[in-house]
Image (tube, rainbow, N blue to C red):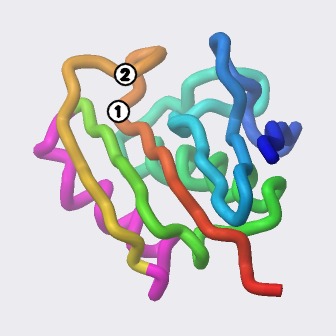
Amino acid sequence: MRQTIQTDRAPAAIGPYVQAVRIGDLVFTSGSIPLTLDGSLVEGDVAVQTEQAMANLAAVLEAAGTSLAFAVKTTCFLADMNDFAAFNEVYARWVGDAKPARSTVQVARLPKDALVEVECVAALPPG
């Protein structure tokens, strides 16, 4: 059964998509960029923007009944691969020991000219 996940603790979708979809025991998030709740892009370097993107992602996962501790795969998009180390430092704090499978790629451009975007597939906790 497909369930749409929507929370007011993360920015609303800025297009024809939802924050996440839960199917069975899996949650698939849309990409999380560094927006505030009012939809404004957070100003700052990639570390500042990654912090906001990960906070948004965590809020969506929580609304779906899971967390980054149950992340099985993330896909990370950077506007500049030279920001990899700074991004990785913040990302590592958020995922902790979970260490999901991950892809990280540089892209030509992200929505709202963000420096980072992260999407996730997470399992629901047992029980």
* Residue at screen point 73% across, 68% down: 66
Q: Which mark is residue 115?
A: 1
- SS at mark 2 in the image: loop
From the viewer's side, name the closer residue of 100 and 41.
100
From the viewer's side, name the closer residue of 64 and 112.
64
Above-or-below relation of 115 to 105: above
Rendered location of residue 43, percent (x, y): 49, 30
Say whether residue 11 is left or right of residue 76.
right
Which kind of residue does numbered mark 1 sit on?
Answer: Leu
* 10 Å crowding of disc 1: few (<14), some (14-19), many (20+): many
Rendered location of residue 38, percent (x, y): 77, 23
Q: Are marks 2 and 1 in contact (CB under 8 Å)?
A: yes
Q: Residue furthest front?
A: 1
Residue 81 is one of the magenta-drawn residues: yes
Residue 5, can we see it?
no
User: Which mark lies nearer to you, 2 or 1?
Assistant: 2
* Residue at screen point 20% across, 47% down: 83
Say whether residue 87 is left or right of residue 84.
right
Residue 109, can we see it?
yes
Q: Which mark is residue 41?
A: none
Rendered location of residue 106, percent (x, y): 18, 35
Say whether residue 28 is left or right of residue 104.
right
Which kind of residue does numbered mark 2 sit on?
Answer: Leu
Residue 76 is one of the magenta-drawn residues: no
Quadrant of the frame with the C terminus: bottom right
* Residue at screen point 81% across, 64% down: 65
Q: Which residues are magenta?
A: 80-98
Question: Mainly helix, strand or loop, the magenta region?
Answer: helix
Q: Which mark is residue 110?
A: 2
- SS at mark 1 in the image: loop
